[in-house]
Image: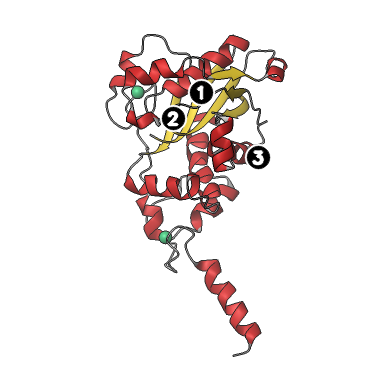
Amino acid sequence: MSALDRISQWFAVSRHACPICGQRRSSHSPLLLPVRHPRPRRILQALCGVCRSDIPWITHPLCRVCGRAERCGDCARRKIRYFEACRCAVRYDDRMRDWLARYKYRGNERLAPILAAMLAYVYESRFASMSIGAITSVPLSPERLGERGFNQAESLAVQLAEWYSIPYVPLLRRTRHTEKQSLKSRRSRVIDMKGIFECMDDAASVTPRPVNLLLIDDVYTTGSTIDECARIIRGAHPYSRIYGLAWAR
Ligand SMILES: [Zn+2]
Ligand SMILES: [Zn+2]
């Protein structure tokens, strides 16, 4: 076999390897692909059948506020809420934790379009029928952005905005970062959030009229991040309605 044959064979092999597990398994899955747009659909179709059937889609949210698949105490406890509702693509199980960690902490960029394609499912099923004026995302602090090199929520949001031809507008800045959210009690999380976001100086002119905004985050834990972002955005744009879209819950 010539070197050229070997190279073309290698390309043929790598083209069909699943971008998640690397196996050359059939991409056939008995589950229907829940995304209609051809680009995210093609991305999800490249996953092997096993990885595709591992995705714990939240198809029937039980909490109408946060989109959780289980009964939800967090939303019942919240007296005032600045966002209208949030929906999430998947349950944050061990496998999804691993997928996100590969992208977010280990910088594996092959995961970015896959996670964005999973958001496309929620966008199409929940938000496409509404008029969404702009997409924005939860910002990272400058320190964390420096460490990681990219804002994972923003990358997903920009990709989603491009697919559905919605303007992506950065509206918020994070003034400081907080300790790892998952290690704290709910109460200290809420207190901690106060004052960590501000509107970007030039954001005030972006939404001069009532508009539905879609705010993207990677993981929804208690909703305090999305709620605080929504509070700040609504301070500058009182008529805006903020909807959250998180990759996992
Ligand atoms: Zn796979
Ligand atoms: Zn809830």
Q: Is disc 2 placed on a helix, strand or loop?
A: strand
Reading the image, the residue beneath label 2 is: 87
In this orientation, which residue lies closer to the viewer: 7 or 130?
A: 7
Q: Is disc 1 placed on a helix, strand or loop?
A: strand
| Mark with earlier residue (3, 2) | 2
Q: Residue at x 54, y 39 (%)?
A: 152
Give the answer, above or below, for where 110 lies relative to 13. above
Which of the colour schemes (rainbow, by chain, secondary structure, one colour) is used? secondary structure
Give the answer, above or below, for where 140 lies relative to 34. above
Q: CA distance from mark 3 to mark 1?
A: 18 Å
Q: CA distance from mark 1 to mark 2?
A: 8 Å
Q: Is disc 3 placed on a helix, strand or loop?
A: helix
Q: Is residue 85 left or right of residue 42?
A: left
Is the N terminus in the top left, top right, bottom left or bottom right quadrant?
bottom right
Asked whether the beta carbons under mark 1 and mark 2 sit within 8 Å of each other, the answer is yes
Mark 3 closeness class: few <14, some 14–19, many ≥20 residues within 10 Å: few
Reading the image, the residue beneath label 3 is: 162
Q: Is residue 87 left or right of residue 215?
A: left
Whether residue 189 appears in this view of the structure is yes
